[in-house]
Image (cartoon, grey):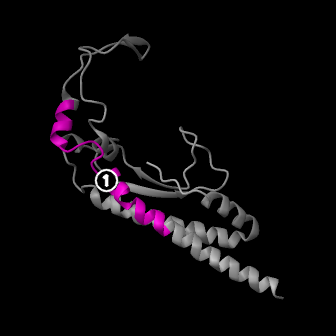
């Protein structure tokens, strides 16, 4: 999901050239907005595993999800679609990601057995089970159970918060420039 707000990236690049301290204040302000979204997403994620299959001690065991907010600089790398996110909230946790998006692929088992694949120096294939279908049914609801509904609902708030912050800091920059210009 992305929200396009045109002109902010260019404005921030110009502010960075003029006043680096102000630039980093704006970034910190934006990060606080993203952190708010991260806390709201974490509040949607159950503390206990929603199904028994996540109750173990391995990589995909159910653990409280963590979020990280990134505010990109002007030289951030572009994503798969060529766009560079200005504000990004990343939710970490393998089990949460699996449970959140389980069933998104359409839910139809196409093959009775997998294709042959390399494994430990040999080849292997196995029967496709219905465990995934059972997990999707046990989780209930539609894919994107925890993360995107909250993110979509928060987009207007985050967008307004970021714009308000940039405008607030631009006013501060204008006042600083006026003071410097009147000397």
Residue 130 sits above or below residue 102 on the image? above
Q: Residue furthest right?
A: 183
Q: Residue furthest bottom?
A: 183
Mark 1 element type: helix
Whether residue 91 appears in this view of the structure is yes
Q: Overall secondary structure of the magenta stretch?
A: helix
* Within-10-Å neighbours for mark 1: few <14, some 14–19, many 20+: few
Is residue 155 a member of the stretch shown in magenta?
yes
Q: Residue furthest front?
A: 6
Res 51 quadrant in image: top left
- The image shows a total of numbered marks equal to 1
Res 47 quadrant in image: bottom left
Foreground residue, 79 or 61?
A: 79
Residue 14: x and y in percent read 72, 63
Residue 117 sits above or below residue 95 on the image? above
Is residue 61 a member of the stretch shown in magenta?
no
Residue 173: x and y in percent read 68, 77
Looking at the image, which residue is at 34% across and 63% down? Answer: 40
Residue 119 sits above or below residue 6 on the image? above
Residue 168: x and y in percent read 58, 76
- In the rendered structure, the answer to whether residue 83 lies left or right of residue 156 reads right
Whether residue 147 appears in this view of the structure is no
Q: Which residues are magenta?
A: 133-161
Looking at the image, which residue is at 63% across and 56% down? Answer: 73
Residue 22 sits above or below residue 55 on the image? below
Looking at the image, which residue is at 22% across and 45% down? Answer: 55
Residue 113: x and y in percent read 26, 14
Res 136 quadrant in image: top left
- In the rendered structure, the answer to whether residue 174 lies left or right of residue 137 reads right
Q: Quadrant of the C terminus?
A: bottom right
Looking at the image, which residue is at 54% across and 57% down? Answer: 5
The residue to which callout 1 is attached is: 149
């Amino acid at each position: 999901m992305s929200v396009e707000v045109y002109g902010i990236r260019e404005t921030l690049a110009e502010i960075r050239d003029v006043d680096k301290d102000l630039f980093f204040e704006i970034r910190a302000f934006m990060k606080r907005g993203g952190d708010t979204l991260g806390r709201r997403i974490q509040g949607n994620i159950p503390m206990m595993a929603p199904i028994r299959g996540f109750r173990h001690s391995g990589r995909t065991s159910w653990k409280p999800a963590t979020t990280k907010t990134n505010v990109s600089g002007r030289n951030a790398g572009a994503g798969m679609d060529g766009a560079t996110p200005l504000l990004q909230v990343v939710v970490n946790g393998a089990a949460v990601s699996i449970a959140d998006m389980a069933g998104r692929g359409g839910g139809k088992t196409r093959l009775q057995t997998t294709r042959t694949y390399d494994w430990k120096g040999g080849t292997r294939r196995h029967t496709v089970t219905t465990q995934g279908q059972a997990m999707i049914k046990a989780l209930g609801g539609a894919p994107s159970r925890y993360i995107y509904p909250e993110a979509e609902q928060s987009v207007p708030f985050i967008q307004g918060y970021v714009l308000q912050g940039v405008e607030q800091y631009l006013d501060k920059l204008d006042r600083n420039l006026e003071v410097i210009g009147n000397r």
